[in-house]
Image (cartoon, helix red, strand yellow):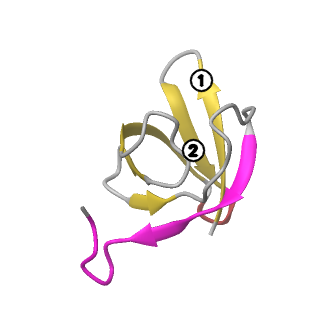
Amino acid sequence: MKIMIRRSPETGLCIYVPKKDLEEPIVESERASLWGGWIRIANGWVLDLPEMAAETALPITVNARKRGEEGDAP
């Protein structure tokens, strides 16, 4: 699914999912740089992010894969 990741002054890093009109803060991440690992957002979803350079500028739109429906959440 396509998501936008941005930095918000109120909540820190957050994502926006256009197809669901959903905006949630990122509450946990596998890697400090985000890229190539999983993130957990406030509603409980776990998303796998693509590999990208650590210095990738935000905001950015990427393809993420939602975990959990197959029981593969960390």
Badge 1 element:
strand
State the image quarter where residue 54 is shown: top right
Q: Mark 2 points at which residue?
A: 15
Q: In this view, does 67 lie above or below 47?
A: below
Q: Name the residue under label 1.
A: 8
Residue 39 marker: none
Q: Residue at x 57, y 44 (%)?
A: 15
Q: Determine crowd level at label 2: few under 14, some 14-19, many 20+ residues with C-alpha closer than 10 A.
A: many
Query: In screen coordinates, is 31 left or right of 13?
Result: left
Residue 41: where, in percent of width, then height?
40, 47
Q: Determine crowd level at label 1: few under 14, some 14-19, many 20+ residues with C-alpha closer than 10 A.
A: few
**Of residues 6 and 24, which is closer to you in this image?**
6
* Mark toward the start of the polypeptide (2 vs 1): 1
- Region rendered in magenta: 60-73
Quadrant of the rendering where the N terminus is positioned: bottom right
Q: Is residue 69 magenta?
A: yes
**Of residues 56 and 58, which is closer to you in this image?**
56
Q: Does the magenta stretch include residue 29?
A: no
**Of residues 11 and 64, which is closer to you in this image?**
64
Task: Report, in whole angstroms, how far the alpha carbon at label 2 lies from the one at label 1.
Answer: 10 Å
The kind of residue on which mark 2 rests is Ile
Residue 2: where, in percent of width, then height?
68, 63
Residue extending farthest to the front is 53
Q: In this view, does 50 lie above or below 70?
A: above
Query: In screen coordinates, is 7 left or right of 46?
Result: right
Residue 43: where, in percent of width, then height?
35, 51
Query: In screen coordinates, is 36 left or right of 53?
Result: left
Q: Residue at x 72, y 33 (%)?
A: 58
State the image quarter where residue 3 is shown: bottom right
State the image quarter where residue 50 is shown: bottom right
The kind of residue on which mark 1 rests is Ser
